[in-house]
Image (spheres, helix red, strand yellow):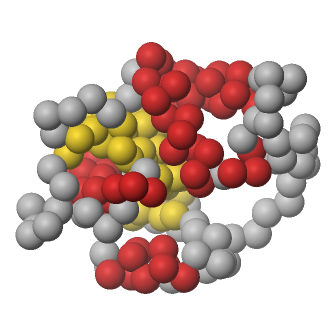
Amino acid sequence: MRAGEQVVHIRDARAEDFPACLPLFWQLWPALKPRGDQDRTIVDGMRTVFCDLLEDSNARILLAEEDGAVGVVGLLDLTFRRTLFHRGWAMIIEDLIVNETHRREGIARQLVEYAEQVARERGCRAIELSSDLHRQGTHQFWEALGYDPCAYQFRKELIRQTGAD
């Protein structure tokens, strides 16, 4: 624990946590936020994937909760895969989200350190992640934790990911 850091409890997510995670998802992906009851397909699709990940032995969703209070203030989801390059298992940090009202309180660092321990216990040889090019502050965060920028990620969307779909 570092001075000025928020004390959080980190645990694995459960299916019933999905509604508490939605505000975090909308902070990371505001374009996906439904603009009314007419489009429940985004939320329904996210709920399906959320629950599928909970059942997947090669995935975990970690939640950070305020100590002594009820409420999810952070989320980190990760997957594991075997890679030829690493000659074994690698952990991929898919998403890291901290509620905007709790940023700069050490919560993201605590989630990452917890995830790193999970990777060590799982026998992973590396941890990988991608970060959108425009997130310069996020890049500084990862570099401060010892992560090296080493590649570009390329993407080709087969189905457009917007709230209008």
Seen from the viewer's position, the closer of residues 70 and 74 is 70
Seen from the viewer's position, the closer of residues 125 and 153 is 153
Residue at (48, 64) in percent of width and height: 128
Residue 47 quadrant: top right
Q: Position of residue 156 (x, y in %)?
A: 86, 60
Determine whether 57 is above or below 118 in the image.
above
Residue at (25, 51) in percent of width and height: 114
Residue at (33, 33) in percent of width and height: 71
Determine whether 146 is above or below 58 in the image.
below
Determine whether 47 is above or below 121 in the image.
above
Residue at (32, 81) in percent of width and height: 144
Q: Position of residue 157 (x, y in %)?
A: 86, 54
Instruction: Report whether residue 54 is seen.
Output: no
For the image shown, how many numbered marks are present on the structure? 0
Q: Position of residue 69 (x, y in %)?
A: 21, 33
Which part of the image, by quadrant, shows the C terminus?
A: top right
Determine whether 8 is above or below 155 in the image.
above
Residue 10 quadrant: top left
Q: Position of residue 46 (x, y in %)?
A: 66, 31
Instruction: Report whether residue 93 is seen.
Output: yes
Residue 2 quadrant: bottom left
Seen from the viewer's position, the closer of residues 161 and 23 is 23
Which part of the image, by quadrant, shows the N terminus?
A: bottom left
